Amino acid sequence: MEVGDIVKIETDKGIFEGLLLPSTDENIITIKMKNGYNVGILKENIKNIEVVAKGEKPKYELPPLNIKKNENLKTVSILSTGGTVASKVDYKTGAVHPSFTADDLIRAVPELLDIANIKGRAILNILSENMKPEYWKKIAEEIKKEIEDGADGIVIAHGTDTMSYTASALSFMVKADVPIVLVGAQRSSDRPSSDAPLNLISAVLAAKENIKGVYVVMHGESGDTFCYLHKGVKVRKCHSSRRDAFKSINTIPVAKINPFTKEIIYLQEVEKSENTKNVEINTNLEEKVALIKIYPGMDGDIIRFYVDKGYKGIVLEGTGLGHAPDYIFDDIKYAIDNDVIVVMTTQTINGRVNMNVYSNGRELQKLGVIGCEDMLPEVALVKLMYLLGNYEPEEVKRLINKNLIGEIEYRSRFDCY
């Protein structure tokens, strides 16, 4: 047998037929069945196996679509970094691969033609857990190219695991007079429950709005009814698999989008575009910034490790209102005495840092730790990278807990003391 063969497998639990897939476990045979789902079968449970059809699937190329530009519609550029949105299945291996030309997108989601003129290309092909600051810089550069080439809006197709980090990075690095919308999918495009088409439609709808800024679009609830537009510096993935995994934190979503009626209902004020298509990028980032989660019994040596490795900034993800155990105070002082900027966020989902309530927080402030209000830890990480890459240390300390692009709300509707 070879990968790509159609095989029939007999077990005590029944007969399974499908496309033979690669398997990372030598004790398991994996096949893709006709219903589109994959199944793994332990070799020890197989009574009989036979090859039903040999050989590779015939290859063919679809002719390019002859679609004329609609002068009455705006142009939206969709840039793919990887992930499952508008990807396609390789039926030889069963893997889902990005295929990101304008033709691919329109064939996958023809409704896009009614919304905008679509341009599409892949700029990266990575799993989002492999994202790096150097890739954020590349994305920013490609956004600038597309806007200068006439795009009225940008959609970034991105894997969901680190999408909020990228949204934060672009929020600080790109200043553009067009909307920049990140979108992903929780369910692969080869699954009947895929959320990719509706998310993509909603993202394109948002990208042609007369607004500017960086946003994230994902399902608003588990069913296929609507999507939410979230501010790029106030959103987090809150579930590993639900389609409505993304939530606005310490605020409400920017807008509710109906991909069927094409209606967008704004839930809060947004900055309007001036229709100038101005774009500036600043990709100066100090990458030697660490994010450290506080936990009971932790060893403060981890802080000294980063200091000795030459790190310039540390974000502490503290407990409660922004606390850390007193037995690592000396380690924190070691960092600050070595000119490392140390800031504090909270590991709670909602709420803010307030280091004036308890003695622990006040002592941390005396050491030089700076509280970050209601900023999310991942946003604080990216912001500290950006500030250290562009300002002197004293200015960084002044700006880190100041609202620059909507990353901080000094008094959110969810505060309660």
Image (spheres, rainbow, N blue to C red):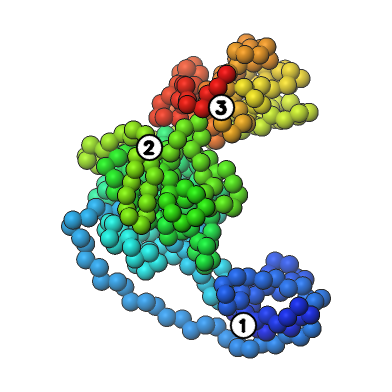
Q: Is residue 321 left or right of residue 284?
A: right
- The spot of residue 44 in percent (x, y) is 81, 76
- Whichever of labels 2 and 1 marks the residue nearer the N terminus, that label is 1
Which mark is drawn over residue 351?
3
Name the element at disc 3. loop
Q: Say which quadrant the N terminus sits in.
A: bottom right
Which residue is depicted at the point 42% across and 80% down?
A: 60
Q: Which residue is mark 2?
A: 267
Residue 126 in view (yes/no): no
> Which residue is at the far right?
44
Q: Which residue is mark 1?
A: 5
Mark 3 is on which residue type? Gly
Q: Position of residue 183 (x, y in %)?
A: 44, 50
The crowd level at tag 1 (other Cα within 10 Å; few <14, some 14-19, many 20+) is: many
Q: Nearer the viewer, residue 266 or 323?
A: 266
Quadrant for residue 180, please give it.
top left
Residue at (68, 15) in percent of width and height: 360
Q: CA distance from mark 3 to mark 1?
A: 54 Å
Q: Secondary structure at mark 2?
A: loop
Closer mark to the observer between disc 3 and disc 2? 2
Whether residue 187 is visible: yes
- The numbered mark, 3 or 2, whose residue comes first in the sequence reads 2
Where is residue 210? Give x, y as percent.
26, 42
SS for callout 1: loop
User: In the picture, residue 332 is in which quadrant?
Assistant: top right
* Relative to 268, 331 lies left or right: right
Please identify the quarter of the rendering in which residue 340 is found.
top right
Whether residues under marks 2 and 1 lie with C-beta atoms below 8 angstroms apart, the answer is no
Separation of marks 3 and 2 at Cα, in angstroms = 20 Å
Query: In front here: 194 or 413?
Result: 413
Separation (CA) of disc 2 from disc 1: 52 Å
Look at the image and tell me in which quarter the C terminus lies: top right
